[in-house]
Amino acid sequence: MATTALEHAPPDTHAATGLWSWITTVDHKRIGILYGASAFLFFLLGGIEALVIRWQLMAPNQTIVGPETYNQLFTMHGTTMIFLGVMPLSAMFFNFMIPLQLGARDVAFPRLNAFSYWVFLAGGLLLNVSWLFRAAPDGGWFGYANLTTRQFSPGMNIDFWTVGLQILGIASLAAALNFFVTVINLRAPGMKMMHLPMFVWMSFITQILLLLAFPIITVALVLLMIDRTFGTHFFVPSGGGDPVLWQHLFWFFGHPEVYILILPAFGIVSEILPVFSRKPLFGYAAMVFSGAFIAFVGFGVWAHHMFATGMGPFADAFFSLATMIIAIPTGVKIFNWIGTVWGGRVEYKTPMLFALGFIAMFIMGGLSGVMHSSPPADLQQTDTYFIVAHFHYVLFGGSIFGITGGAYYWWPKMFGKLLDEGLGKLHFWLMLIGFNLTFFPMHIVGLNGMPRRVYTYSAESNFELLNRLETWGSLLLGLAFVVFLWNIIRTTRSSQAPAPADPWNGATLEWSIPSPPQEFNFPKVPQVHGRDALWEMKRERGGSLPEPQRVDGRGIHLPNPSFRPFIAATGVLITLGGFIGGSHLWVHLAGLAVLLYGIFSWAFEPTG
Amino acid sequence: MPHPIRRRLPAYAPVLTLALLALATACSPDQYPQTTLNPRADFARQADDVFRTTLWLAAGVFVLVEGALLLAMWKFRNRPGAADPVQTHGNTTVEIVWTIIPAVILAMIAVPTVQTIFRTATRPGPDALQVEVIGHQWWWEFRYPQLGITTASELRVPVGRTVNLEMTTIDVIHSFWVPAFAGKRDVFPNRFNDLWFKAEVEGNFPGQCAEFCGIQHGRMAYRIVAVSGESFDAWAGGFNAPPRDFSADPAASALVKQGQALFTAKGCIGCHSMYPALPLIGPNLHHVGSRSHVAAGTMVNTDENLAKWIQHPQAWKQGVLMPELGLSDDEVHAVVAYLRANQ
């Protein structure tokens, strides 16, 4: 690459404040913060939707919301938590932490990274704008055809869903390619794949899952969209289409998606546990291979979501056994985490509490998962609250506990201030108790016959007591997040001394640079010789390193800010948005014009 | 001096005891008519056997693994002056052992699972009672081809005889589920799925659609009534008779006669057949007066509930095909009397 004076412009000239600096940023750390802030707002929205659901179900035959609204609420709760909550919260850590843990100055394609974020935001906003039209998606996060075909869902509701998810898919695919290449190409000198921090490993496997799974859902969504828009018959039985095809396509994506949601959290707790146990991760290689094995076999279990469709005994047996096999590497992971704590010197700081809570809750979600891997038992459990309990133990007890632990762990690195420990512990205990009070009774009420996705239940069914407990639990959960918000606000406003570079005696490279890091991350790219690179450096220096100083980054090559990714993302939104309520040719064309302008001007803009 | 035992009991003890009792009762399946934990037919019993195997194994694993976690957390907590831990990286023997143990436990679940899958996949013999089950948004239709009977929202079956359900839907995907008798089976348009079971005891059991099927998925329920073989035959014989015409019946009250006239005049008859062998677009109402529930199994069949349903179907079940007919209180009263007379 030619080196010109322009490319060596000092990074200090990049504006660091103001709206425009955020719109044009290509700094992986700022993009990470954008992901985190947007995802947290969407997450709170999804939480409010959940609270309304719980309010409606507190007693039999309630009419807090009508059936129409209820169906929109549970559809948007699921869609929001999965695509706009957990996935982008993980993306926040991918963005902020993967380059830092690799010892890199940015991701492989910084402007593509900005593009991913803006496309994600566009998809999230489009999905939620539907509320303003009183037409929020109402076909469930799984969107089963033929209920979602135009005949049975004539409104714009499902259009918002198919279009919104396609846009989010573009964001996910672009981001996944970016992080995949980043991990392959931008590791610090000497950092072999088997030296990668476990968070990077699990994130790397997640990117592979995203790259393989998202094309499938995209195909399914395109087929459904053109069924709805142009009257094709892919899923329309009267035209020879097959609604079961939708289920296969959806779950071929949908099951790997479960691992997309949980593997980053596996990675986060695998970072936290060693640091607060003061000893390395137990069985590193087994952790890597079990993660890879889970991801690989995860593509061969999709039809366990479909035992009730009557696939026949051979398919049932195959998908059942494949599902059970996944329990083995998952068990290995849990034992290795306990093995990491065993023999350590455990410090009960807030991140560690969440990591330990993660293990305790994930064990329960895993065990209930094994229980419905058996089709005869699953035929009674599927589509009941037993399943709702199961996947909340995995995705809330698992992913959200892990991500929250990660937030407390990395907060000082991201924002330069330590979150309050007292409030953090209060947050943890409220969340642990509220979580179990909300979701444990769902096992019982599900086994006793309460189906999912019902907007009410009869008094005769006797489900009231357990539902009341769940609703009270959900209030405690809400309170836990109020405490978290309060902690964030208080910490941000406080005049506490800036966090040191390495407040937890960390093992990985992100703790070797000031908090928050400077734009170029590493003044000098570190040389790595093994795992736990920072612990290794500290041992070599006899225990601790001097506090790193902020330096003048003059001469460090960094990409220029650009607003072109934002333009291109706007083009994507307009082009696909033209499919809401039928196909609008002029909207598509206008969107394509914006998109092409964005991409071409981006292509010919100097990178910096 | 206070009693030593009483002194030890804190003030909240009675409250705590009551709460624990309430929780224990809440966990008992007998409390829940729609429970999956009290199987009353062979299919459900086989599913329950597998479930109990998985439950106890899972409970054992739960106690051991959570116990190990808590033990590690307690034993290795940071204490002042504690030495730096030994920097172990793993232990191959231990890791192999804890890979094999879960595999063995899973095999204990896998073997009965596969056996049960194939056992429940066999077809029932030709002497089974055939029932065609048709899902509608949002009610279930049942046809007995061997008997020439059509009914809705209440499936009557004989105890001790295998019932074979051939199931489909006229609109979207639904899922047929009566937990006491069998697991779920989805129904698809243009396709027949089957399910069989043999009821073990008499009784009236609730069932409910288990696949999300639109705005009123929550109110798409039904009942299965299991009766003795003789009682079933008697019911089938009597059911096959054409509907009673009350207009010329001197024993019928004027109210019933008025109700029958209204049933025709207000157009109810356009959707609801009173003939046992004639299916129409809405639920068949032959013998509706003797059903335990109305409105797709969501209301107990009392006169008040029936009146509430007929007068304002959209209030109870927004989006249902049945329109608001604007019947006066007196007219509703008469129609209810007529439907009640159809025993």
Image: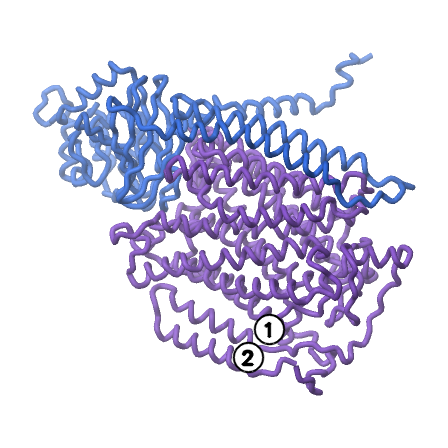
Chain colours: A purple, B blue
Which of the chains bears the disc numbered 2? A
Secondary structure under tag 1 reads: helix
- Mark 1 or mark 2: name the one nearer the start of the chain: 1
> In terms of depth relative to the viewer, which is nearer, B286 or A308?
A308
Where residue B79 sits, quadrant-wise, is top right
The residue under label 2 is A602
> In terms of depth relative to the viewer, which is nearer, B58 or A496?
B58
The residue under label 1 is A111
What x and y, as percent, mark residue A469?
57, 34
What x and y, as percent, mark residue B29?
49, 24
Q: Residue furthest left?
A: B248
> In terms of depth relative to the viewer, which is nearer, A503 or A130?
A503
Q: Is residue A494 visible?
A: no
What x and y, as percent, mark residue A375?
45, 34
Which of the chains bears the disc numbered 1? A
Q: Is residue B341 left or right of residue A528?
A: left
Instruction: Judge the density around disc 2: few (<14), some (14-19), many (≥20) Cα neighbours within 10 Å.
Output: some
Tell me, yes or no, whether the two marked residues, 1 and 2, touch with CB atoms within 8 Å. yes
Indicate whether A106 appears above or below B239: below
Q: Amino acid at mark 2?
A: Trp
> In terms of depth relative to the viewer, which is nearer, B221 or B70?
B70
* Residue at point 67%, 45% (across, down): A286
Instruction: Judge the density around disc 1: few (<14), some (14-19), many (≥20) Cα neighbours within 10 Å.
Output: many
Q: Is residue A118 visible?
A: yes
* Residue at point 49%, 46% (across, down): A300
Q: Amino acid at mark 1?
A: Arg
Q: Residue furthest bottom?
A: A5
Placement of the N terminus of chain B among the 4 image quadrants: top right
Q: CA distance from mark 1 to mark 2?
A: 9 Å
